[in-house]
Image (spheres, rainbow, N blue to C red):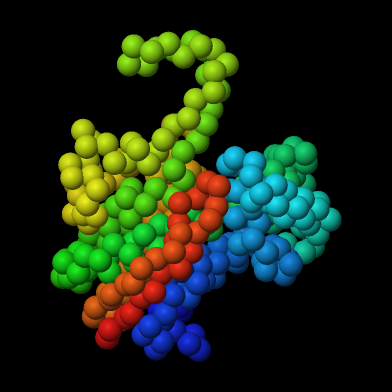
């Protein structure tokens, strides 16, 4: 984790910094950009395109409408510039290209597959990291427990996703009539699934509003969705957060946070800024 304990200017060296712009954003960018393997223009714009994708999924307000131009830019880039000779060898996008050349993937589906690597791999992790730092800073006992027992880092990562729930909801159309809790939902009706509400369900999570890194059923959260549409990148996201926690345990004695600002996005629940201080 170069943003923690390596590189030219680290968060540990700064001591006081913004947990979002200086830590939560650079971390997944440093990892995912190389894995995706886009040419330079794509690498430089992944964060913008990802944010626009989530703005478009919400209500079509000014942000949703403005996101259309960014998404069109991304689509044009993928078709024009994401060619096999420009993709990083061994990367996810190069594998898509190779699958097209061997007939394993329909060429018409390739741009959609590339977009699916770009859009969801950043903002959700950034959001979860922001919530993790916020709650660790507000609950010193949780940080003390992590330092005393680093083996709960994985559980703490899931608890950050549960309590933060980066994607608060998703909508679907009913494929057939279905009755839920005595209410009939007709075929074709549009439904909204509130993941954030499920993750605060007191019948599932005792004292659900509390950040508890030792919560026994933290992994049963809905932060990554469920069923056939469960997030394909969930294991990478948890691994990133778990590695961040481990790096912090090795370098940070105490952390405190200030008051966050909310990031304005139509779908993602995240902080726009979060003052934090690392004490070594």
Report which quarter residue 256 is drawn in. Answer: bottom left
- Closest to the observer: 44 or 227? 44
Report the side of 150 relative to 66 (left or right).
Answer: left
Q: How many marks?
A: 0
Report which quarter residue 258 is drawn in. Answer: bottom left
Expressed as whole percent of the image width and height from the top left, the position of residue 171 reads 52, 31
237 over 224 or under it: above or below: below
At horizontal 46% and vertical 46% (from top left) the residue drawn is 167
Expressed as whole percent of the image width and height from the top left, the position of residue 219 reads 29, 45
Report which quarter residue 102 is drawn in. Answer: top right
Report the side of 168 relative to 41 (left or right).
Answer: left
**Quarter placement of the C terminus:** bottom left
239 over 11 or under it: above or below: above
63 over 229 or under it: above or below: below
**Quarter placement of the N terminus:** bottom left
Q: Is residue 3 visible?
A: yes
Q: Is residue 89 visible?
A: no
């Amino acid at each position: 984790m170069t943003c923690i304990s390596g590189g030219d200017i680290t968060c540990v060296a700064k001591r006081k910094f913004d947990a979002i712009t200086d830590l939560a954003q650079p971390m997944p960018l440093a990892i995912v950009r190389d894995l995706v393997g886009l040419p330079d223009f794509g690498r430089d714009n992944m964060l913008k395109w990802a944010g626009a994708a989530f703005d478009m999924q919400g209500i079509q307000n000014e942000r949703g409408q403005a996101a259309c131009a960014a998404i069109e830019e991304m689509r044009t880039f993928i078709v024009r510039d994401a060619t096999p000779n420009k993709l990083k060898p061994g990367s996810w996008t190069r594998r898509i290209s190779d699958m097209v050349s061997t007939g394993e993937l329909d060429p018409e589906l390739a741009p959609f597959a590339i977009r699916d690597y770009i859009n969801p791999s950043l903002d959700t992790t950034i959001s979860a990291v922001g919530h993790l730092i916020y709650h660790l800073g507000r609950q010193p006992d949780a940080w003390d427990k992590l330092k005393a027992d680093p083996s709960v880092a994985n559980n703490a990562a899931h608890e950050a996703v549960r309590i933060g729930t980066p994607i608060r909801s998703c909508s679907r159309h009913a494929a057939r009539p279905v009755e839920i809790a005595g209410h009939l939902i007709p075929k074709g009706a549009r439904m909204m699934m509130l993941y954030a509400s499920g993750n605060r369900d007191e019948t599932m999570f005792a004292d659900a509003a509390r950040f508890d890194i030792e919560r026994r059923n933290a992994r049963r959260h809905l932060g990554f969705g469920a069923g056939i549409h469960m997030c394909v990148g969930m294991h990478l996201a948890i691994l990133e957060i778990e590695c961040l926690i481990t790096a912090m345990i090795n370098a940070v004695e105490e952390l405190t946070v200030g008051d966050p600002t909310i990031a304005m996005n139509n779908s993602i629940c995240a902080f726009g800024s979060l003052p934090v201080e690392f004490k070594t």
